[in-house]
Image (cartoon, helix red, strand yellow):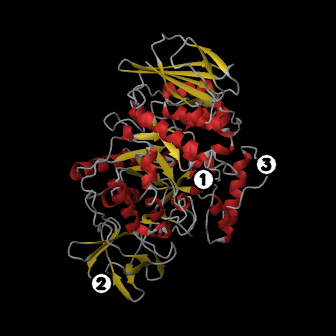
Amino acid sequence: MEQINVLQRGIGVNFTDTGEASINIWAPEKQNVEVLVNDTNRIALHKTEIGYWQLVTDKIRPGDEYKLVLDDQQVFPDPASASQPRGPHKGSEAIDIAGYEWTDNTWENIPVKEYIIYELHTGTFSSEGTFEGIEKKLDYLKELGITAIEIMPMAQFSGARNWGYDGVYPFAVQNSYGGANALKKLINECHRKGLAVILDVVYNHLGPEGNYLSVFGPYFTNKYSTPWGSAINFDDAWCDGVRRYFIENVLMWFRDFHIDALRMDAVHAIKDFSPSHILEDMRKYVDELMVKSGQRHYLIIESDLNDTRFIDTVKNRGYGMDAQWTDEFHHSLRVATGQVQHGYYADFEGLPHLAKAYQDAYVYNGIYSTHRKKTFGNKTSRYPGWQFIVFSQNHDQVGNRMLGERTSQLVSFEMCKLMVAAVMVSPYIPLLFMGEEYSESNPFLYFVSHTDADLVEAVREGRKAEFSEFHEKGEAPDPQSEDTFNRSKLQWDLIELEPHATMLKYYRTLIQLRKSDSVFSSLERGGLETHVDEQREILILKRTVNNARRVCLMNFSKQIQNVRIDEDSSFWKIFDSAAPEWNGNSTASETLDRNLTIQPESILIYAG
């Protein structure tokens, strides 16, 4: 693969300092490529040796609509389009992707270990369903204690309603959300208020509608099968152009949009047996960009392989990812609260596995998995806590339920408080899913807005098949229905009502404790102990950092429990989820007595 210039985008249509359009289109097996500007002017491109068609011209200006004509007959939008104002099937808009009057020059990305992440979906987070709607809530998120927002994917997809994982133009910002400049404005404002921005991106597949990449070149390969069909071609013939396409995408978000971190969706579905894995190459180019720009950027992954190669350094023959989502903490926590052990939850044993997740991050770290029918995972002992992100809910774990029920609809008010506390006292990075902080009651359902009737029906049938593994009964809401989308929107008026107002105050207090306490703000994993009483459903977590010690007593049962603690009495109570101020009736001792009474579904925290 040819060397990539990290300081400017090198594919698609871009504008030079003199205002000319620099065009670079990858179509290695075509005999002729032209640009059709505003449906009137056709401009011929010149082919290079490695499959790119290029030209520098003054015949295209920002705001012009253009299409690409392949072999004098096929007309399609640009696969590297930076703007699709009329959706995925219409022409591309030429925009100056590097042009914006930023005012965040003094912004420095915060250390990843200080991230407290708030995951949100642009379309359902606000009544507007736009980037501007998010911007209006930034002060609220700051007051909550959030330090980084994570925006679910917004690469251009069909229609106006989608989770975002059906994007088909990785470089184009969804038009119905506001487009590129509205996103830049949001990021600029986040930085002004001290918030980092994480963008969820999808490099394991593209969506089904408006996906025209294969007509330009071998972007996909039949060497491997994925849940979405043929795999993206990262290691087969002509893969250099594909690899560059996605590396350029990573660099664009960091360089041209000032994104602080990328969360890469399901990297276990990326198939690449090249000597240098595509993630490793992304890491190398991002490192080069950081040296030249002086800015710091993080690469975060979602992976279910329990393979530390992903988060190990390139020097240690790893892929160099900074951190990863850790689903097994979530699964263990869910089962500990009484979640039915269907589907992948069948592999988890509740409190013993939650204790193991506190200790080891991966529950399956070289032990036999009944669900997978094999020994699975490897050890994480030498990896710091900030490389693991944990949560009690996220878009997948809510939205992939048939009825999209949030935790607040599945467990009691008290258990909700215990679950988030279990996340916040961990030695890992915490993530919240939008609305959980005030016990949002609306579901978060799966929704699409495809225009192809056959595709819509296929999505419906696919959802039914997915739920069969969980033995769900009844009918799933229609993902194509606009009502399904509207039912998933947050109800912001709830934060003024009870019990939502109390829950919101609880979250704020708990997050503040996490940030201000010397033990909980540390992601050191060494001084951590767990003790489990399965019969009484008690988990005791002890953490020690620099001689400061915290004892967390968690009662997952529905009964009052008496617990004997083997600690001296020089500990004092710093948090009680069952206190009267949180609508509880706890009378727990202010000091750590050897015999303590813990309210049902609650946590007590003592410091010493």
90 over 597 or under it: above or below: below
Residues 144 and 249: in front is 144
Residue 16 appearing in the image? yes
Which element carries disc 1, helix, strand or loop?
A: helix
**Which amino acid does the dot numbered 2 rest on?**
Lys
The numbered disc on residue 473 is 3
Place residue 43 in its image quadrant: bottom left
Q: Residue furthest bottom?
A: 40
Q: Which one is closest to the eye, mark 1 or mark 2?
A: 1
Whichever of labels 1 and 2 marks the residue nearer the N terminus, that label is: 2
| Cα gap from disc 3 to disc 1, whole angstroms | 30 Å
Residue 428 image point, x, y percent? 45, 33
Q: Determine contact: label 3, label 1, CB under 8 Å.
A: no
Residue marked by disc 2: 59
**Which amino acid does the dot numbered 3 rest on?**
Lys
Residues 160 and 577: in front is 577
**Which amino acid does the dot numbered 1 rest on?**
Leu
Residue 487 image point, x, y percent? 65, 60
Whichever of labels 2 and 3 marks the residue nearer the N terminus, that label is: 2
Residue 271 image point, x, y percent? 48, 48
Residue marked by disc 1: 494
Residues 352 and 602: in front is 602
How busy is the neighbourhood of tag 1: few (under 14 within 10 Å), some, or many (20 plus)? some
| Cα gap from disc 2 to disc 3, whole angstroms | 59 Å
Residue at figure coordinates x 48%, y 70% from the top left = 215
15 over 463 or under it: above or below: below
